[in-house]
Image (cartoon, rainbow, N blue to C red):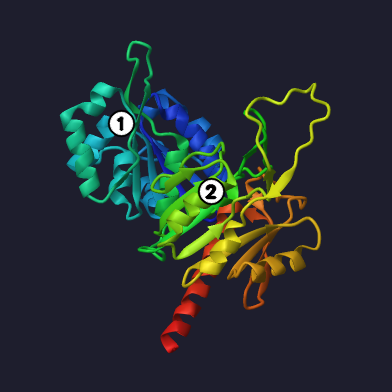
Amino acid sequence: MFFQSKKIAVAVTGGIAAYKTCEIIRELKRAGAEVRVTTTESAKRFVTDLTFAALSENPVAGSLFDENELAGIAHVDLARWGDVLLVCPATANLIGKVAAGLADDIVSTTIMATKAPVVFCPAMNSAMWENAIVQSNVEKLRTSGYELVEPEWGALATSSEGEGWGRLATSARIIQKLKQVLLGSTELKGHKVLVTAGATREPIDPVRFITNHSSGKMGFALAEAAKLKGAEVVLISGRNQLQPLEGVKYIEVSTVEEMQSAVFKEYKHAEILLMAAAVSDFRPKSRSSSKIKKSELDFTMELEKTPDILAELGKKKTNCIHVGFALETDNGLNNATQKLHAKNLDMVVLNDPLEPGAGFVSDTNVVTLISADGAIEKLPKLAKLTIATLILERVLKIKQFKNKQAAAV
């Protein structure tokens, strides 16, 4: 629920991509946002106001002049109401209007009247998108301070058009832009944050490996939260099914050895280390060069310990803040506290995968934050991005305290 209490106004214009805005509104609602929609007359030809009213759970402002004169001035009310205005899809016509300073319908007048950030999501056929006048208008929006989520290459509306530039950006990219606008800050601007995520894989033979259930979601949430705070972020992850994060340097690895090499290389200039990866504790002592047959009934696999990346970094630690994760199913607090001290951590994040809402693939988590100064804070079930943000807030306090101590010496 990372958009909890946020008010998002959505303006829909008359393009075939208008149907995709329906799913975006659903995602915004799932994330806790309050949504209100306004539509141009052309947009109603593609998706009815009734659909948007049902999805947003609010009446749609579909006309510049409300039949009820006592209802207020719709475009002014909406312009003042929203924390952000999302124009999705934004047609060439609407972009041209705004670039020229024209306002003759409820969408264009709302854009002109709002002091909130405005995010345009253009969508049109490739010939229109590449038109020199359209590109000039888009550049004028940028220089005027408007935000844009540029369209993508892909299949266009009709088969005759084939593929090209102009396809509406994915909902993931649009939601990410809204996160930057609504949740972004500069607290970590100029600072490098190194994050690890996901599970490592240790090969048994060319087709089998030892791994665990980690999805990488917590690590990706930490990288996203750090990026939203303005940091330079490096994310090193085992293989996963997640979308890459825009603006984040991403390095995919497989084995513990590969992760160790990548982490050691990137650690040199890191100021904050968030080690959320589920690193394998053991690996086969020897790897078969060919597939082991099921018929080999006497097969025995000997294991050896893998390198402890976090412990090794703890020995090298100087000014970098180290945060580790402890996944425990028994005696959690004691085990996590031992890990905190043994690996020279500033904080350890404890979670139990058996606790409701804290599963590997869940979008939520339930964690306890244990700091080196002895502070223990149990958090309720929250979205992983919310937890990641809270972890970084605690890290910033630790960093500020250490800076004060260093300045006093």
Q: Residue at x 38, y 12 (%)?
A: 159
Side of 93 where 221 appears, left or right: right
Task: Name the disc covering residue 91, or none.
Answer: 1
Can residue 42 be seen here? Answer: yes
Side of 151 where 364 appears, left or right: right
In which quadrant is the C terminus drawn?
Answer: bottom left
Position in image of residue 291 (x %, y %): 67, 25
Task: Name the disc covering residue 115, or none.
Answer: none
Task: Name the disc covering residue 259, or none.
Answer: 2
Other-residue count near label 2 (Cα within 10 Å), few / some / many at <14 / 14–19 / ≥20: many
Position in image of residue 238 (x %, y %): 56, 43
Position in image of residue 63 (x %, y %): 37, 37
Q: Residue at x 61, y 54 (%)?
A: 307
Camera-nearest residue between 102 and 178: 178
Camera-nearest residue between 228 and 36: 228
**Amino acid type at mark 1:** Thr
Q: Residue furthest right?
A: 297
Q: Quadrant of residue 97?
A: top left
Other-residue count near label 1 (Cα within 10 Å), few / some / many at <14 / 14–19 / ≥20: many
Q: Secondary structure at mark 1?
A: loop
Camera-nearest residue between 195 and 209: 209
Q: Nearer the viewer, mark 1 or mark 2?
A: 2
Residue 50 lies, with reference to residue 262, above or below; the image says above
User: What's the CA distance linking mark 1 and mark 2?
Assistant: 45 Å
**Amino acid type at mark 2:** Met
Position in image of residue 74 (x %, y %): 39, 46
- Number of marks: 2
Q: Secondary structure at mark 2?
A: helix
Residue 151 lies, with reference to residue 83, above or below; the image says above
Residue 90 lies, with reference to residue 385, above or below; the image says above
Pick whichever of labels 1 and 2 is earlier in the sequence: 1
